[in-house]
Amino acid sequence: HQLAAQVLGSLVLRHKTLWKDLQRLAGTDHERLRRAAARACRAPLQEDAEAFARFEALAKSLLTVADAAVQQAIDAALCSAAPLHHEAASAFVREHGRTVQL
């Protein structure tokens, strides 16, 4: 849980090419890998002004996954995004009917 959020997220922040790997993890059948992909988005969203578009593509692919932990990870990432990407995060919340408070 923490490994994805801290280590993987920090790597993605430094190496933007790893977003494609997160997208691949999000598309797998393994629930832990999908969760890790969603959790790893938090650090880049907090510091990278260009990260939201990448996150949005990844998150949209996970919206239909019936795993509460994945959905919670998406909401946590949206909260992390709010300070830097408030307008985009708010639009995502409205568009997809998320109940998270930013």
Image (spheres, rainbow, N blue to C red):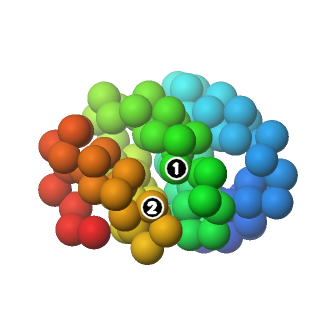
Is 37 placed left or right of 15 in the picture?
left
Q: Can residue 17 be spotted in the picture?
A: yes
Query: Residue 17 falls in which quadrant of the image?
Result: top right
Quadrant that contains the N terminus: bottom right
Q: Is residue 91 above or below residue 58?
A: below
Mark nearer the N terminus (2 vs 1): 1
- Say above or below: 66 vs 90: above
User: In this image, 70 relative to 25: left or right?
Assistant: left
Q: Is residue 32 left or right of residue 18?
A: left
Q: What is the crowding at mark 2: few (fewer than 14 residues within 10 Å), some, or many (at least 20)?
A: many
Total numbered labels: 2
**Which residue is more in the foreground, 78 or 53?**
53
The answer to the question of whether label 2 and label 1 lie on touching residues, with beta carbons closer than 8 A, is: yes
Location of residue 63 (image quadrant): top left
Q: Position of residue 8 (x, y in %)?
A: 72, 58
Task: For residue 5, say whether it is visible.
Answer: no
The residue to which callout 1 is attached is 52
Q: Residue at x 83, y 52 (%)?
A: 15
- Front-lying residue, 39 or 53: 53
Q: CA distance from mark 2 to mark 1?
A: 7 Å
Q: Amino acid at mark 1?
A: Phe
Rendered residue at 62%/51% (across/down): 50
What amino acid is found at the position of numbered circle 2 in the picture?
Answer: His
Q: Which mark is residue 82?
A: none
Disc 2: which residue: 85
- Residue placed most toward the observer, 58 or 26: 58
Residue 31 is situated, as x and y percent measured from the top left of the image, at: 49, 39
Element type where label 2 sits in the image: helix
For mark 1, does the 10 Å Cα neighbourhood hold few (<14), some (14 to 19), or many (20 or more) residues? many
Is 15 above or below relative to 60?
Answer: below
